[in-house]
Image: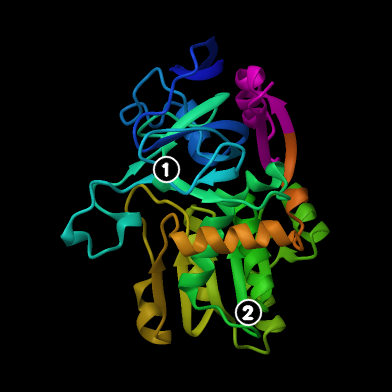
Amino acid sequence: MKATRYEGNKTFSVIEKEVEAPKEGEVRIKVAYSGVCGTDVHIYHGMMDKRVSIPVTIGHEMSGVIDAVGVGVSGYSAGEKVVVRPLDDRGAKPSDKGFNHVCEDLKFIGIDSPGSMQQYWNVPAFTLHKLKAETDLKLAALIEPLSVAVHDVRLSGLQAGETAVVLGGGPIGLLVAMVAKDTGAKVIISEVNENRIAKAKELGFDAVNPINTDLVAYVKEQTEGRLADVVFEVAGVQPALDVMTEVAGIRGRIVMVAIHGEPKPVNLFKFFWKELKLIGARVYEKEDYEKSIALITANELPFEEMITDVQPLSNIQQVFENIDNNPDGLKVLMDCQL
């Protein structure tokens, strides 16, 4: 079978290896598609070399079909379409309070252990979610990032009729906007990349460039002065942190979606003055995956528009180089059988 490996130094290789039998408690998946996410790009840039075991097969946004079932696995059979929720929480302790998706010793499959950018992938059966037979496997590869968005919106408590401002119009930002709009909220996207603004508008969103437009004044105008009920900080840059407390209205909720690896300045006075709430949101829980599966199965949102390219697994080096050269793109999928 064909498998990819990150070798370090912005280099991937494609190797041939034996198809492995699933161990006890595992299933073997014939991987259909594997999406490239921001974390994968960070790995490519060497930013996670201290964490990943080089050489390593990465990838965690995927869809596929069960190919074989290991000893001790029940409830699954060959031929069923599935996705993987790539969280290995077997190290959870009572001190994690039952929140195993963010447990102290959480292992992320595809980062801390081999991932999906290969033709066949063996994973623990407890990570699986079944799909309906009619599910489009190309769209199903979006379920993992969509689950991030579902989790973010669920934790925000966003209600129909409220206004949500999404700071950042990249793949996760657009998925957050889709889920927020599906909830019945009014959504405004703030993004500095004009191509991504154009894509957001094409998808039916109100999108503005905060470099050219005073975002706070614009949101005030759109809400009769109330400002945002919920702000999703997805951009991960200081200007977004600066504006998030300004654009949030009284008792607004700010959801921290982006990962900030270092301490950053935040206007804490605004939290006091407007009684704001700051909500941390990390990965997803089982219910978020099930909600995402239902959304993908219904296929009433413009998920197809999120996929900007599909490339064979053998082109992995070129795919990552192209992402560097074209930061405007949204979701690139690897066809893991080519």
Q: Mark 2 touching mark 1, by CB under 8 A? A: no
Circle on res. 179: none
Residue 80 sits above or below residue 30 on the image: below
Q: What is the quadrant of the N terminus in the image?
A: top right
Which element type, helix, strand or loop, lies under badge 1? helix
Does 131 appear in magenta? no
Circle on res. 163: 2
Towards the viewer: 144 or 30: 30
The Cα–Cα distance between marks 2 and 1, rounded to whole angstroms, is 40 Å
Magenta stretch in the rendered image: 310-338
Towards the viewer: 165 or 174: 174
Residue 5 sits above or below residue 179 on the image: above
* Residue 209 picture quarter: bottom right
Q: Amino acid at mark 1?
A: Ala
Does 331 appear in magenta? yes
Residue at numbered disc 1: 125
Viewer-side label of 2, 1: 1
| Residue at left offset 73%, top offset 32% | 310
Towards the viewer: 330 or 13: 13
| Residue at left offset 50%, top offset 69% | 244
Estimate how packed mark 1 is, as few (under 14), some (14 to 19) or many (20 or more) residues with alpha carbons within 10 Å. many
Which element type, helix, strand or loop, lies under badge 2? strand
| Residue at left offset 67%, top offset 64% | 178
Residue 194 lies, in percent from the top left, at: 75, 50
Q: Is residue 178 left or right of residue 118?
A: right
Q: What count of labels does the image hold?
A: 2
Towards the viewer: 246 or 148: 148
Q: Is residue 215 left or right of residue 56?
A: right
